[in-house]
Amino acid sequence: MFSLFNSRPKTISFPPLSLYNSETRSPETFVSLSKKEVKLYSCGPTVYDYAHIGNLRAYVFADTLKRTLLYNGYVVNHTINYTDFGHLTSDADTGDDKMMKGLRREGLDISLDSMRLLSDRYIKAFNEDLIALNIIFPTQFARASDYVREQIALIKTLEQKGYTYATSDGIYFDIAKFPSYGRLGNIQLAELQNGARVEINPEKHHPADFALWKHGELGWKSDWGVGFPGWHIECSAMSAVHLGETFDIHGGGLDLIFPHHENEIAQSRCAYGHDVMANVWMHNGFLQVEGRKMSKSEGNFVTIHELLETEKFGGQSWDGLVLRLAMLMTHYRQPIDFSNRRLEEAKSIVERWADYKIEINSLFGGEMAAWRAEIEPESSILDDLNLHPLISEMSSDGAAGAKGDRGAALSFYAALELLGFEGVEANSRAVASLEIVADDVLSDSLDAIIQMRLEMLKAKNFAEADRIRDDLAAKGIQLKDGKDAATGERVTTWEVKR
Ligand code: AMP
Ligand code: ZN
């Protein structure tokens, strides 16, 4: 798996990759900070409940970006965080902590231990969602409650540098001290004076000032007393730990531009003293239902569990790859109107691709792997991840390949991998639930996961590597780590235990 990515000669010169930067509001030719590696941060889910398919669009988008970078010969160091405390229902500094809401919903007591239990549950569910959508796992998942010390240290730095002030309920960032505040979202501070989208609090100097620390009965000890870091600081702290104080690309859904990303920039730039937090800011559009953003608060949400495992939607359950394509059929920056019709359309394409791949496998079999490195699929994807021409070309290449055109078959294969459909002849729902346990059905998806896990082990990220092993074990897939007798390299094999 990913032999296309791994085996491409690094000397091939590719046409430049153009990415739309939300900060400059224009497409830019991408230049990475280091020659070989791209450092990518995606804001992760708040793990108090199942993610809905709108949330998951953000990770399908990040995965497309990552595969495009891999295809261009880069190594991608990718971090996704899990927010497991401190995200209030308003996105600003008011409302309930979403984790508390989750604890009450599930009848758990209000304690840090129960919060851990609750987030374990939904972290596992989120990882399963990623597998169902064939999203490559990040190099590291960073869980906010594992980095409280780093967050406190960062708040202290901001305090020492004079960017903060105290109120009766916490420590706040003083945006007046950071003149670039609002530049990412082109937000005029005067617009925020009336409290639109920010918390009005008479103790704050400006309505857009935001909490770095909140006092509370539940939380962690600090010099300010017991409490917890504000939601925004976790990403500033964890991105610096894993990617450095300045990194290449930062992504998330459109709703994160303000206040979350604006606040991340203010914190990181003021604490670390650099002009730039991330070189490129990329945001996906919303997945909508009847013109309204899918969200928990609107109540118009669908989880992937529901979509994959029940027959509620149009009388049938759906495959993860069908949902993946239903998302990719629209450019990542445009809104998607989610409907059964869209799923039907994606399903007929995915089924056709599966038939072509089976046909091509029987025609060319083992030859395909050796040829992969030499071919290039349609390069429209290099124009800010424009997939439209590629998706239509895949259908014609697949058809020609199935009739014996070797070149077309190779392009089709490459494009399947590039877009995350390399296991199309399998069924991702079956992989997730192990209804079908044929080796060749599982191997494509598993090889990707095993590869990522080996990289984690190499980076000594044992906690995440163990989590992946345990997640798979819960599905009946047992990993065995060992060493290749000839090369001495670490290898992992797998078997299905019913
Ligand atoms: P949250 O768990 O609310 O922090 O959100 C996780 C990710 O999902 C963030 O990148 C959000 O911007 C993104 N997101 C939330 N709702 C939608 C939606 N309806 N469509 C696309 N992305 C969304
Ligand atoms: Zn974030």
Image (cartoon, rainbow, N blue to C red):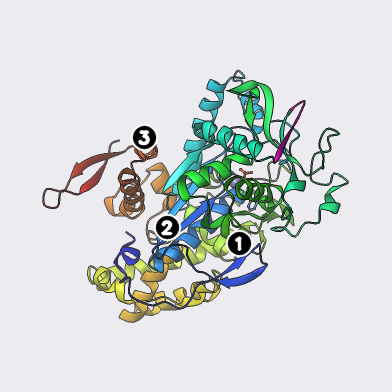
Earlier residue among tags 3 and 1: 1
Please provide percent x and percent y for residue 203.
83, 32
**Residue at x-position 27% and y-position 74%:** 371
Q: Point out which mark residue 76 bears.
A: 2
Please provide percent x and percent y for residue 304.
55, 46
Reading the image, the residue beneath label 3 is: 470
Please provide percent x and percent y for residue 479.
28, 40
Q: Are marks 1 and 2 in contact (CB under 8 Å)?
A: no
In this rendered view, identify the residue nearer to me: 222 or 313.
Answer: 222
SS for callout 3: helix
In the displayed structure image, the side of residue 385 where residue 110 appears, left or right: right
Residue type at mark 1?
Answer: Arg
Please provide percent x and percent y for residue 34.
43, 62
Looking at the rendered image, the disc whose residue lies closer to the viewer, 1 or 2, is 2
Q: Point out which mark residue 342 bears.
A: 1
When asked about the image quadrant of residue 466, the answer is top left
**178 magenta-colored:** no
SS for callout 1: helix
In this rendered view, identify the residue nearer to me: 373 or 317.
Answer: 373
SS for callout 2: strand
In this rendered view, identify the residue nearer to me: 186 or 314.
Answer: 186
Residue type at mark 3?
Answer: Asp
| Outermost front residue | 161
Q: Which residues are magenta?
A: 163-169
Earlier residue among tags 2 and 3: 2
Alpha carbons under labels 2 and 3: distance apart: 24 Å
**Residue at x-position 82% and y-position 39%:** 205
Alpha carbons under labels 1 and 2: distance apart: 31 Å
Quarter of the picture holding the C terminus = top left
